[in-house]
Amino acid sequence: MPFGNKDKKYWIIPQESLAPEHLGLGSILKRPNDPIDILNRGAIEPLSESEIIREREQVTKSLDNAVSSGFGSKLGASSVLAAVVGASPSLEGSWKNATSVSFQATGVRAQHFVPEADYVNRALRTKRVDLFVRRSFFTAPVYMVVGIAIAQTLKRESAISSERGAGAGVGLGPPGTGVEVSAEFSANNESKSSNTDSVENEVILAYRVRRFRYSKRKDEFVKRDEDETKPAHYTLGEDEDEDEEEGQIPVFSFFEEDDIAAQDIGMEGFVDSSQ
């Protein structure tokens, strides 16, 4: 499937070179731009094959993306000031930033799925996810990996440059003196950095994440006799039912309408032409 440049680039290109087994469909992240800190690592809720959409392999795939931005200004004295005191000061400044990212990949295979509410509720019921949600007082969203693109080989190049400039000048010629004096100074700062890496084994080329929020619900607690309660995923202690937060569990509330866009989290990305 061909890819094109569009505003919403949902496939996020990670900086890390991750093996496919280190980032799977259904992984839950604390932050969309951090595929390392996975809340359910080693305990991902399994998906059935019928739920996974697998795209045709792309023999080769490449991307070149460059962005440049800048600003320049110059301030001078008014003609009235110059006529009265014979001075014409000026100030000027400028800045320019440029970034470029490119990659060449072979044997790209993409797969993704649309998570349903019951799947998300099951995925939430791991100890690390439950603890993270409780510590955030049920307010922070979490992010589920709903798509991954794997490449057989990958070569990436990135570069960033920055330029800063400033200048000032003044011309003095008091009326009637016949004397003119002028002075100028300028300062410039320029920095550049680049990076190139290549991987000859299977590697995660990009991933997609969907933000979802949850609500809290009272865990079931039905007293059958003195020592027996209705089974729950996490056993409640003797006094935990008295603590309002301790008796709450995270349940699926709703997904955001779209996957997270790469530029919204300061990452590079791409989007397929069907979107």
Image (tube, rainbow, N blue to C red):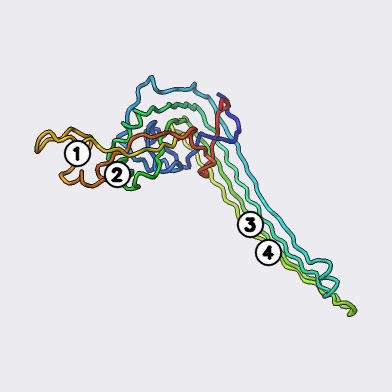
115 or 150: nearer the viewer: 115
Label 2 element class: helix
Disc marking residue 266: none
Q: Residues within 10 Å of mark 4 (few under 14, many from 20)?
A: few
Mark 2 against mark 3, which lies toward the viewer?
Answer: 2
> Percent x, y for residue 34?
43, 43
Read off the residue under disc 4. Answer: 187
| Sequence order check, earlier mark of 4 and 2 | 2
Identify the residue at the far bottom of this view: 177
Distance, label 4 to label 2, CA atoms, is: 53 Å
Name the amino acid, label 1: Thr
| Sequence order check, earlier mark of 1 and 2 | 2
Read off the residue under disc 3. Answer: 190
Identify the residue at the far top of this view: 50
Distance, label 2 to label 3, CA atoms, is: 46 Å
Label 3 element class: strand
| Residue 8 shown left or right of residue 87 in the figure | left
Disc marking residue 235: 1
> Percent x, y for residue 244?
26, 45
236 or 146: nearer the viewer: 236
Q: Residues within 10 Å of mark 1 (few under 14, many from 20)?
A: few
| Residue 46 shown left or right of residue 207 in the figure | left
Q: Residues within 10 Å of mark 2 (few under 14, many from 20)?
A: some
Q: Residues within 10 Å of mark 3 (few under 14, many from 20)?
A: few
| Residue 87 shown left or right of residue 105 in the figure | right
Whether residues under marks 1 and 2 lie with C-beta atoms below 8 angstroms apart, the answer is no
Mark 1 against mark 4, which lies toward the viewer?
Answer: 1
